[in-house]
Image (tube, rainbow, N blue to C red):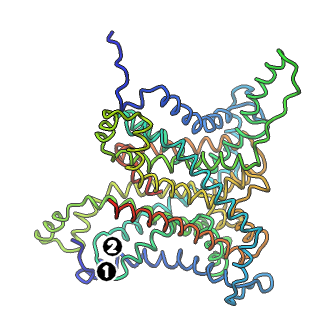
């Protein structure tokens, strides 16, 4: 049983004080300042006057920025969907693998996840660029084909600096985020339910959609959330792989704070992004509660 | 030789469709990284076609003093961040696990914030904080010059450590604590001799998590770093912006190898990853 803090005041105070001070001073205070700035405006080059204006938020929902928000949400949603489609069979295979294979497969999924994000993105640049491995491979095939039939000279596929590259990059980076929660949900599943479904004549696909998916729904939801949130706020992937028209919201925020030097507007944008994140979490919590109430 | 039985209904791993799918995902995840590592040994500046084996880009990377300095900075920050995060994370986990107190839900929620808040938001918050509230003096002796980045890293790492430690403490048998107390141990003694030993594996896991998180972070560091405090990812970023060179490949390969070793150590210490995968999935 948990004990009341009054029973061991010295231990309680000693253990709580340092983390609490740290959290307030080095996390909540910085966020609070940004929040305050979002209601201010630039005065001169370095001064920011906090006037309680909503001008920055009004500007953030102008069509130009609203479009970037919608685009970011769409790219994150597409990424999440692709991760789910690609990752679900992988999680399923791991769940039903032998103990030894399970260990190795999990390791294989987790290893890229522990590798530096920048390095993984850099590795993708070398694959996707005009002189990259894909284009070199295509060129080789093309040259071979050109010997048999007359063909135009090879034109490399422009993949870098496109939305396509950004989505590929986001899927590449976030796939483990999806597979691990899916696996932990599927692993808890009662396997005899699947066997019963198969015994009673349902096919594999039918069993999957009628039995496995409904039972694993909480795990799927948490995988979706864990993938969607970082994808929505992704900065590095669109920055390095995307072109001028594939900027996501994080890139716009960075620009306000670094080059454009419009901190109040950047602050408003980053808080809107944060609210979107909280909405996503709240929606998931609500869905989870509904599910719990039905069961 | 006995004929292999056809795959059972649930042996998905033995179906060729599933094997093909897994192989494709494996290629997708690993081919870019393996190509990156292979081409770090490629004797060609343009780094497109294989021209023969060389170690000269490793030589170059090791002689690139700014790259080495950035690497040393990253390791120093990661080490400092690990020590502080484990201490703070363990303390707050202990408080949340052990005590009933007013405001517990609020603390719990606030502690989840650094985990869920988008990196970019935390990055700009740190930028503003170190620009306006606590301007970090320039030109401090090493390692004090890394203070701002270390503080930022601890802020996002220690809640992760707390998650790992709390997960471990859930399996603690409180009767052990009562037994210790019956046998005359005081509060502090109980913590030191009974609770801490149970916590130990999660402290190691938390330490490795904090170390990797710190070493891996780019976005928050990018906003916190000054011109004279460059970390490895920030340095690589500026090199990548410039061009794709074998030198970056060599430096990246070193970091990948380091990560693989760290992961191997972590798994050895933690045991079966199948048992801990859930904690990682929820944790990161």
Direction from residue B146 to residue B42 in the image, left or right:
right
**Label 2 vs label 1: CA separation?**
9 Å
Q: How many C-alpha atoms fall within 10 Å of the one at disc 1: few (<14), some, or many (≥20)?
A: some
Q: Looking at the picture, does residue A54 appear above or below residue A95?
A: below
Q: Which mark is residue B95?
A: 2
Pointers 2 and 1 in contact (C-beta within 8 Å): yes
- Left or right of B117, for residue A138: right
* Picture layout, residue B32 above or below residue A39: above
The picture places residue A205, in percent across and down from the top left corner, at 45, 37
Q: Which mark is residue B242?
A: none
Q: Residue B239's x, y, as percent?
A: 74, 50
Which residue is more in the foreground, B140 or A213? A213
Where is the N terminus of chain A found, in terms of image quarters? Answer: bottom left
Number of marks in picture: 2
Q: Residue at x 65, y 78 (%)?
A: B135
Label 1 marks a residue whose chain is: B
Instruction: Please report the residue visible at 15 percent of the width from the left and 64 percent of the height from the top.
Output: B175
Secondary structure under the numbered disc 2 in the rendered image = helix
Q: Which x, y percent locates residue B44?
A: 77, 32
Secondary structure beneath dot 1 equals loop
Q: In which image quadrant can residue A197 be found?
A: top left
Q: Which residue is mark 1?
A: B101
């Amino acid at each position: 049983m948990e004990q009341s803090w009054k029973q061991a005041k010295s231990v309680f105070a000693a253990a709580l004080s340092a983390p609490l001070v740290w959290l307030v001073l080095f996390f909540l205070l910085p966020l609070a300042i940004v929040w305050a700035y979002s209601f201010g405006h630039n005065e001169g080059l370095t001064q920011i006057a906090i006037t309680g204006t909503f001008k920055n938020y009004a500007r953030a929902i102008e069509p130009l920025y609203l479009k970037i928000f919608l685009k970011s949400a769409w790219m994150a949603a597409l990424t999440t969907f692709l991760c789910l489609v690609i990752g679900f069979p992988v999680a399923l295979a791991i769940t039903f693998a032998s103990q030894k294979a399970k260990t190795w497969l999990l390791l294989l999924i987790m290893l890229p996840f522990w590798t530096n994000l920048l390095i993984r993105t850099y590795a993708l640049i070398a694959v996707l660029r005009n002189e990259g491995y894909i284009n070199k491979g295509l060129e080789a095939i093309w040259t071979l084909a050109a010997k048999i039939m007359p063909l135009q000279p090879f034109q490399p596929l422009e993949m870098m600096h496109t939305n396509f590259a950004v989505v590929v990059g986001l899927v590449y980076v976030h796939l483990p985020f999806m597979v691990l929660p899916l696996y932990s949900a599927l692993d808890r599943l009662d396997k005899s339910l699947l066997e019963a479904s198969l015994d009673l004549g349902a096919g594999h696909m039918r069993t999957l959609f009628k039995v496995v998916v409904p039972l694993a729904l909480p795990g799927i939801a948490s995988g979706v959330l864990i993938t969607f949130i970082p994808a929505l706020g992704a900065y590095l992937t669109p920055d390095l792989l995307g072109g001028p028209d594939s900027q996501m919201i994080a890139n716009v925020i960075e620009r306000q704070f670094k080059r454009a030097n419009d901190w109040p507007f950047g602050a408003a944008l980053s808080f809107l992004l944060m609210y979107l994140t909280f909405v996503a979490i709240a929606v998931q919590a609500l869905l989870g509660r509904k599910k719990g109430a039905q069961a | 030789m006995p004929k292999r039985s056809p795959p059972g209904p649930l042996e998905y791993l033995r179906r060729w469709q599933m094997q093909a799918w897994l192989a494709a995902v494996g290629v997708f995840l690993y081919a870019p990284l393996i190509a990156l590592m292979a081409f770090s040994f490629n004797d060609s500046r343009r780094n497109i076609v294989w021209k023969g084996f060389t170690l000269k880009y490793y030589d170059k990377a090791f002689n690139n003093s700014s790259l080495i300095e950035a690497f040393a900075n990253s390791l120093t920050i990661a080490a400092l961040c690990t020590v502080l995060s484990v201490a703070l994370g363990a303390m707050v986990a202990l408080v949340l696990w052990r005590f009933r107190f007013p405001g517990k839900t609020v603390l719990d929620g606030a502690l989840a914030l650094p985990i869920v808040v988008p990196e970019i938001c935390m990055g700009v918050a740190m930028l503003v904080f170190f620009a306006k509230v606590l301007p970090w003096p320039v030109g401090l002796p090493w390692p004090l010059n890394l203070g701002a980045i270390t503080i930022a890293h601890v802020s996002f790492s220690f809640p992760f450590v707390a998650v790992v430690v709390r997960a471990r403490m859930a399996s603690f048998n409180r009767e052990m604590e009562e037994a210790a107390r019956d046998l005359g141990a005081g509060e502090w003694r109980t913590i030191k001799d009974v609770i801490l030993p149970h916590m130990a594996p999660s402290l190691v896991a938390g330490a490795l998590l904090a170390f990797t998180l710190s070493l891996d972070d780019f976005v928050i560091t990018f906003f916190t770093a000054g011109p004279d405090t460059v970390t490895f990812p920030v340095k690589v970023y500026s090199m990548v912006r410039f061009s794709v060179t074998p030198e970056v490949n060599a430096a990246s390969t070193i970091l990948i190898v380091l990560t693989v070793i760290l992961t191997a150590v972590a798994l050895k210490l933690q045991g079966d990853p199948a048992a801990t995968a859930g904690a990682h999935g929820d944790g990161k």
